[in-house]
Image (cartoon, rainbow, N blue to C red):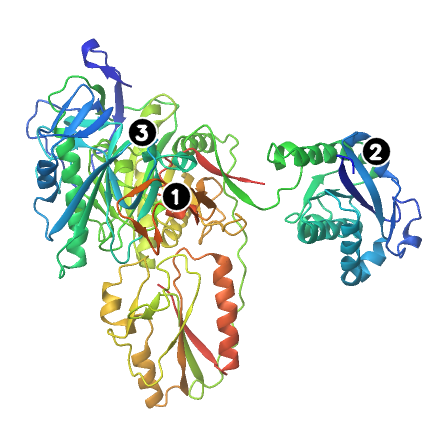
Amino acid sequence: MSNKYRVIHFINQFFAQIGGEEKADTPFFVSDHVIGPGMAFQNSLGADFEIVSTFVCGDNYFSENSEKILPEIVEEMKKWNPDILIAGPAFNAGRYGPNCGAICKAAQEYLGIPGVTGMYEENPGVEMYRKNCYIIKTKNSAVGMRTAVPAMTALIKKIAAGSEEPDPEKDGYFAKGIKKNIFVNETGADRAIDMVINKTAGQPYKTEMIMPAFEQISPAPPVEDIKKAKLALVTDAGITDKMNTERLESARASKYLSLSIAGMDTMLPDKFCSVHGGFDTTAANKNPNVLVPLDILRRYVRENKIGSLFNTLYSTTGNGTSLKNAQQFGAEIAEKLLENKVDAVILTST
Amino acid sequence: MLFFFEQSYFIILLVRTTSQQINISINTRGDFLKLEILEHPVNEVLFGDRSKYSNGILILNKEEFSRAILSGTYGDYKLEIQIARPKEDVRIIHITDVIKPSYKPNGPAFPGWTGSTDCCGSEITHQLQNVCITQCFSYSGIQEGIMDMKGKETSYVFFSQLINIVIRPELLTEKIEKKDVASDLVRMNTQAAEYTASLAADSSNAAGTLFDTDNATISGLPNIGYAYYIQAQGPLRNVYIWGKDCTKMKPCMISPVKVLDGAIVSGNYIIACQKNPTYFHQENPVIRSLLARDKKELNFAGVIVSTESSALNDKRENAQRIAEIAKEKGMDGIVITQEGGGHADVDLMLACDACESAGIRVVLIANEIAGPEGNLPPLVSMSSKADAIITTGNNDEILHFPETASSLGGTVMGTRDASEEFDSPLSILYTATNQLGVSKMTTKQF
């Protein structure tokens, strides 16, 4: 074995010089030759890299059979023992782009090797796969091959050398949507005052934090007959049993609890407490009903104002808890509520 | 900005202050109208028979220091005092607050805590440089911080570069109300800070900064103000102004010089990485930077202080009031800082909207809770008007903490030995993403 970095290159039927749209159903195959733009990549990459094989698949064949052929492609890739995958570049080709993204993602996930591709900013593959691979910004047609190849090669060499972190601005790829803490030359306070001077003067300024679009949740339809409905209590107020036997965190929760309220008319302060670290729990620990209104709901059941109450209270701590954990807790709790035929939930937050 | 006494070399910082303050300060002595902060350098802290400061060496008599710290507390405490120096192989845990040693010969350095008369913002203040009082305390319902004195993690924590006088009270009283414990913690820390700095009061080896005040402005420069949110959510999560908890305070002006002179003291002990310890109120970097640029790049148009209420209507009202005051004071632009997350993000965005709607250009300083990979929404509240935000870093990034030779402030963290190696989100690292913009950290997209 040589010491060269082993490279697999993925292209479509057009760049493999098989044909255009009429050959878009060309099935996946592997060639041990360097084909089409592979030549330019091999020249540009130089003697430390070797394109060991070219993977070819027609645009339509890939997108219509991706579930079936991706595992096949992964197995085939493993045989070549690659260090890196190059896909495309795909420019503005609407099927080729996502296909390049998909194969790069698979290379990262199943072989642990980086994938580098290139696309025009409007290619749907950019938004679909920018998180999973390096997508170099290219022109919108193959005219841009001359600039795309050196840009992709430069990034590949940087990744291979491993001495410097790739940088979307310097290396010209679409930011992967991951953020890291870094140190700069000025303090946050000084940067803020520079920014406010520029903003006030109508000079350009660049925010350091881009606002994401929040997911919109459409509300469930209204409960048809509340007098027959089964209600449940769910809270992020950090309620635990008095001993906190399951060690629910006071912040950054990693779990939620299922607490039985069967046979209880009220939230007794010697049975429950809140371990939430984000608010003053003194009042809540004297009377936990202020966090979840068990006392009132039991009375409503007796007075037939509501049908019944589900006997499990789900509780977590909503204090610095990550969105990912919160989404997972939410989905699991919702599933359990559905299984138990709960019609409506009183969700209290602190 | 600094001068040495021997050379009598003055550079004066001129500060535009406002006449409206939440507490009218009366200068009873009349011989000083300006504030002069004298910083005495400390190169070593040792324990000895007699407390004194000379030639950059601070010597502390432990018994006398302990008595000064524990004076007037509600509860009984056992007190441990230790020193941690930069580059020592030690981890400090259970950190609740850090304070800068400060002493005023003619009045309390921390009005409302170490005395009631008030010459805050005027006369002379002695401070110790290169040293801090670091309080460590374990108590249910708070989230104390940690810092390492050696290794890579020191770059995240300003105090890792200072000599830490670590005071660790342990509560002995069984029946004591939370509010009294909260008050005791602040009392002990302010008393420790005042005692240590008092030892340097006779020393002439100080670098000084003179803060003068006037209302003059230079035409053609933008009028830039500062809206300073502080946390006020009950005992152990309160910040105090002149010793008062601010839960019922409405937004108002506060003199920036008074802020630098001990008017604001922290008693907020939640989320270690994103809180504003007393030290950073005393050294507020936004105020410092505005003062340094006053009449050069901008006219400093004043500081509005407000709490982050836990009720939505109060949040709206406070935000509106901040915008009204800013408008009254003729601010063209404003920097807004928060303390804490979640709730505090809502205040930040409401104030941003209110000020932008009033025609005042806004820059926000905030930290992020963007998940370990930095790919999740950074704040819990957002506004389309918030188009100029400085980020002080992502709380959730995972760091590796190496094994240390020993620990101060306690020996156990959760269930593990405090000096063991472990991986943890940045959030436990004390003041790592401080929201006053102390550090040079930001986030970058990759």
Which chain's residue wears label 3?
Answer: B
Instruction: Measure how far apart labels 3 and 1 are at the Cα level.
Output: 23 Å
- Picture quadrant where residue A71 is located: bottom right
Q: Is residue A242 above or below residue A10?
A: below
At a point 17% along the width and 24% down the height, the residue shown is B34
User: Type of residue at label 3?
Assistant: Arg
Residue sitting nearer the eye, A211 or B154: B154
At a point 17% along the width and 26% down the height, the residue shown is B58
> Looking at the image, do the residues carrying marks 3 and 1 touch, with CB atoms under 8 Å apart?
no
User: Type of residue at label 2?
Assistant: Ala
Q: Which residue is mark 2?
A: A40
Measuring from the top left, give residue B446's x and y in whole percent. 59, 41
Measuring from the top left, give residue A76's x and y in whole percent. 80, 53
Residue sitting nearer the eye, A160 or B209: A160
Quadrant of the image for the N terminus of chain B?
A: top left
Total residue callouts: 3
Which chain's residue wears label 1?
Answer: B
Which chain's residue wears label 2?
Answer: A
Q: Which residue is mark 3?
A: B288
Taking the image as shown, residue A167 lies to the left or right of residue B289, namely: right
Q: Which-is-in-front pick, marks 3 and 1? A: 3
Q: Which residue is mark 1?
A: B355
- Can see residue A250? yes
| Secondary structure at numbered mark 1 | helix
Q: Is residue B18 above or below residue A78?
A: above
> Looking at the image, do the residues carrying marks 2 and 3 touch, with CB atoms under 8 Å apart?
no
Measuring from the top left, give residue B144's x and y in whole percent. 30, 49
| Secondary structure at numbered mark 3 | helix
Instruction: Measure how far apart labels 2 and 1 are at the Cα level.
Output: 55 Å
Instruction: Measure how far apart labels 2 and 3 are at the Cα level.
Output: 56 Å
Q: Which-is-in-front pick, marks 2 and 1? A: 2
At a point 49% along the width and 84% down the height, the residue shown is A224
